[in-house]
Image (cartoon, rainbow, N blue to C red):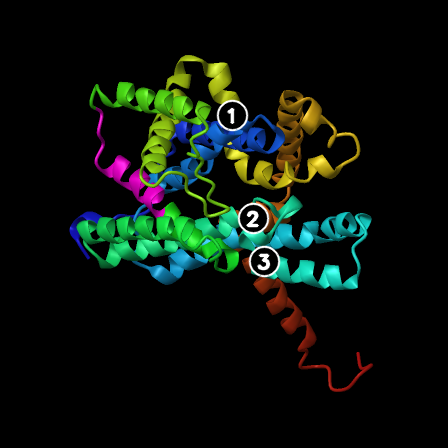
Amino acid sequence: MSPHHAHTATTKHLPWIDACKGIGILLVVLGHVTEDGFLNRFLYLFHMPLFFFLSGYLHTAQADFRDFFRRKSIHLLLPYVSFLVLLYPAEVFHVLKHGADAHSLGYHALTLLWGGNQMQGLYGVFWFLTCLFATQQVVNWLLVKCSLATTVAVVLCGLLASYANSVFFPWFGLPLDLNVCVAAMPFFLAGYLWRRFTVDKWWIAPAAAAGVGFALWEIKRAVPLAYNMRGAAYGVPVLSFVLALCCIFCVVKISQLLRFAPPIRKLMERFGAASMGIMFIHKVLPVLPGLGRLVPRHPWVALVLFSAISYAFTMLLLQFRWTRALLMGSQKDFALLVSRKEQTSRHEVAATYNPRRTEPGSA
């Protein structure tokens, strides 16, 4: 392993990261409640790549693959499974409400097992967790086992493979949207490299702003730039990727500049810290009576209400150890639950063994 890869996990808290995640999750909610074609195409250029970029920015290469796999399984896959089980009754009710029969329910269950872009409705955001998990595992392995140059080369080959998937084989997909990983890895690695090789040249900000302006112009001209990761449609090869990075850089800079506006910064940090819960919960709200009508009629009202309600429910889930562990992916709480269960099991074994007890009913 190259010396520059021998990192340990960082514990330094970066407030602007939470603010950036907060902006990002609000853009995700907005993308799901607005039917404005122009705004939607612009948001889908960068709002999901932003989260892969931030994950890469925070990543440090982990040589203990087993421990890294375990920790990320708790953080990402455990909430995936927990919310899948929790929401399934509501999803079945929603399907039955639209006249589904037993055959349709069976097919629906199979699509949930396949996952990825086959999951619709309440499960529309689930692809992100499995894709992020696989992306972290693959890139981490490359960073530990290969030189940085080799890692970059492999990831760029993955980007080319994603274009082949999008342009020539749009029908091809893997379970859990794992084929999308090749499109996610470049953003993840870009975030990783940005932190390790801090570049703060004066021309980067105006260049990124120019990129955002060009993206808006091209979207206005109906150029299909949208980087729709869930559907494995990555816009214009190379151009969409570069313009997405320009948009991500601008969001990062805005989140950093929020230090001059403390009330807004704190609000965005709160939303960012609750982004896991907001991501899941906001997809449930449109199926509730009354709230669903807001989406086509008043999308900006829906954005405020859905974000506030999702945040409030997330805060409620964070009050209990079980929900923090199972639904929020808290590794600390999961470890406490496991250790507590083991202690309880040992106590039960000790209680059943009594050397003075020779037969049932004896004192």
- Residue that carries the numbered disc 2 in the rendered image: 126
Which of discs 1 and 3 lies nearer the camera? The answer is 1
Reading the chain from its start, which is encountered first: label 1 or label 3? 1
Reading the chain from its start, which is encountered first: label 3 or label 2? 2
Name the quadrant containing residue 355: bottom right
Q: Pick out the residue farthest to the bottom.
A: 358
Classify residue 95 as left or right of residue 240: right
Which label sits on residue 340? 3
Residue 348 in the magenta stretch? The answer is no
Nearer the observer, 334 or 166: 166
Classify residue 183 as left or right of residue 155: right
Going by the numbered disc 2, the residue's amino acid type is Phe
The 10 Å Cα crowd at callout 3, few under 14, some 14 to 19, many 20 or more, is: few
Residue 186 in the magenta stretch? The answer is yes
Which of discs 3 and 2 lies nearer the camera? The answer is 2
Task: Return the x and y of residue 33 as percentages of the image width and height.
Answer: 62, 30
Q: Main secondary structure of the magenta part?
A: helix
Residue shown at 46%/51% (left/top)? 131
Residue shown at 78%/63% (left/top)? 102
Which label sits on residue 176? none
Q: Which residues are magenta?
A: 185-200
Task: Return the x and y of residue 80 as percentages of the image width and height.
Answer: 57, 52
User: Are the residues tagged 3 and 2 within 8 Å (C-beta)?
Assistant: no
User: Are the residues tagged 2 and 1 within 8 Å (C-beta)?
Assistant: no
- Residue that carries the numbered disc 1 in the rendered image: 38
Residue 307 in the image: above or below residue 192? above
Task: Return the x and y of residue 14 as percentages of the image width and height.
Answer: 38, 31
Going by the numbered disc 3, the residue's amino acid type is Arg
Q: What quarter of the picture does the N terminus occupy?
A: bottom left
Classify residue 154 as left or right of residue 22: left
Going by the numbered disc 1, the residue's amino acid type is Phe
Can the viewer see residue 10 in this picture? no
